Image (spheres, rainbow, N blue to C red):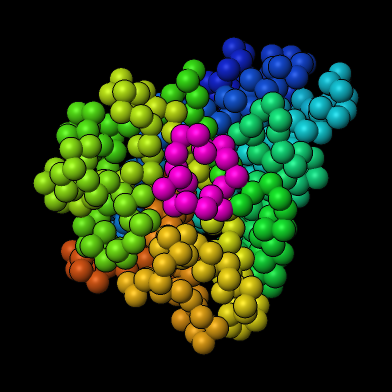
Amino acid sequence: MSLVALLLLLAPGCVDLEETPLDFPGPDNFYATEDQIISALTGSMASMYSQWDNYSYGWGAFQDDANDNTNLAFGSSHANWIWRAHYRSIANLNPIIASLQSEESTIDPGAKDELMAQAKFIRAFNYFVLVRAYGDVPIIIEDTDVLGDISREPIRDVYDQIIDDLQFALSGLPESWDEYKGRPSKDAARALLAKVYLTMASAPLKDASQAQNARDMALEVMNNTEHSLIPDIRDVFKIENKLGPENIWCFNATSDDIATPPQIWLPGSMAFGWLDFGTERTWSLRYPDQPRKEAYMILEDWNGDSWEDFSYRGSPPVRKFAYDDQETMERLQSTANIPLLRFADVLLMFAEAENMINSGPTPEAVDAVNQIIDRANDGVANPDHPRVTLAMSQAEFDSAVIQERNLELFFEYDRWFDLIRKEILCDVWPDRPDIEANCDQNDYLWPIPQADLRLNDLMTQNPGYTTPE
């Protein structure tokens, strides 16, 4: 479905409403009660994540160096689901925001601010993915007339909208949720703002002044008591910790809304898995020999056999999302979460920004990275993966931080965007000339869907992709 067509219809959610334009709250899409709005917020997340759909099965779109589905031979339909899923989510959110702003709303003011903060947080996340994936994109907000043609807005304007939404979210979200764990909190807004500012300090904007903002937001999360590293690397992805101290915000699966079956991660020798996704072989062979490797990858199956014996992909499978018990996984059930913001991510964002601001590493930046390295090594000195030091140059430390992000956050929908903002996409294939040959600057942005180009005279295509006649 094209963006124009999509925004004329209310995307499927948890509230059954008529198909009506989304640029204003009419009688059929006006949310009168708190329960209706909560259901619509759930629908906005379901637009991005549900069993077998979008982010629950979307790793093939993010062709980074850890992913063995990578070839970088992008066609004109590559990752179109990203465009559709995020604009569908936005289409769910805009009537919520418009209804809450309406003078007709009878919702308690305190609840109204909290609901608005959640809606604007999720909308900011949507636009943050879109602007990184496509560059200039249409900005559709509550007072936009979507009945006409829609043009792409400059990247800087999109970031201004994201920051406005996140700053509102930060003011209205609670520090934590007692009853509704999994919803975004103030730390989620702080962490997402840190990531937004750090990306603005990187390519393509390269606004170095934003590094200070990134550092300050990350430090606020670090100084708060709500989140921290889970001490044992083997416990990070355990099911009982999926809403624990390290995970700040996730795609959250429940027993009523299970994740895509864990068989997509498992080999045939484990719960008759299908192993739809796996780590890239040369990347996994370069991964340091440390406890984190065994915690984050399946190096042995339940029989004690090595991955070299059971992985038809020729590389270790990903363990991160396969921590359910054996019986649960054999029933094709899973409630594993996919983290979008983790405390480890915050530490690394802080270190990167601190290094930028000070033209070199500081003791605080070094400590932030070494907390993650120490956990990865069980606190034991490891020549295969040593700690970072103050003796490093600014460039050396920055490279070490980005590599640590690679090792810690792989398959968490983060590495691709690091490669883009650091402009190193074509430089991370030392053993894969076949992939390197397909890489050029056009791969830094994904194609605008053909349907939108056909139906909207104002829509333009990104370089390197076809435009329908």
Q: In the image, what residue occupies the spot 31% across and 28% down?
A: 326
Name the main secondary structure of what is drawn in magenta: loop
In which quarter of the view is residue 274 placed? Answer: top left
Q: Quadrant of residue 434?
A: bottom left
Q: Percent from the top left, x then y, of residue 227?
A: 64, 49
Would residue 247 appear left or right of 404 to someone viewing this image?
right
Q: Residue furthest front?
A: 380
Where 218 sits versus 235, above or below? below
**Residue sitting nearer the eye, 449 or 82:** 82
Point 23% across, 28% down: residue:
271
Q: Nearer the viewer, residue 444 or 24?
A: 444
Q: Is residue 254 left or right of residue 264?
A: right
Asked if residue 294 can be seen in this view, the reply is yes
Q: Is residue 303 above or below residue 189?
A: above
Magenta span: 229-246
Q: Position of residue 318 (x, y in %)?
A: 31, 46
Q: Please state, as top left, top right, bottom left or bottom right, where the N terminus lies in the image.
A: top left
Q: Residue drawn 41% across and 48% down?
A: 234
Residue 78 position in % (x across, y down): 34, 46
Asked if residue 242 lies in the magenta stretch, the reply is yes
Residue drawn at x 74%, y 23% as measured from the top left: 25
Q: Can residue 9 be seen at all in this image of the molecule?
A: no
Tell me the quarter of the image containing the C terminus: top left
Q: Find residue 68 and report its horizontal and vertical position in percent.
A: 25, 52
Q: Is residue 434 left or right of residue 328?
A: left
Q: Compare residues 139 and 458 and report the one nearer the observer.
A: 139
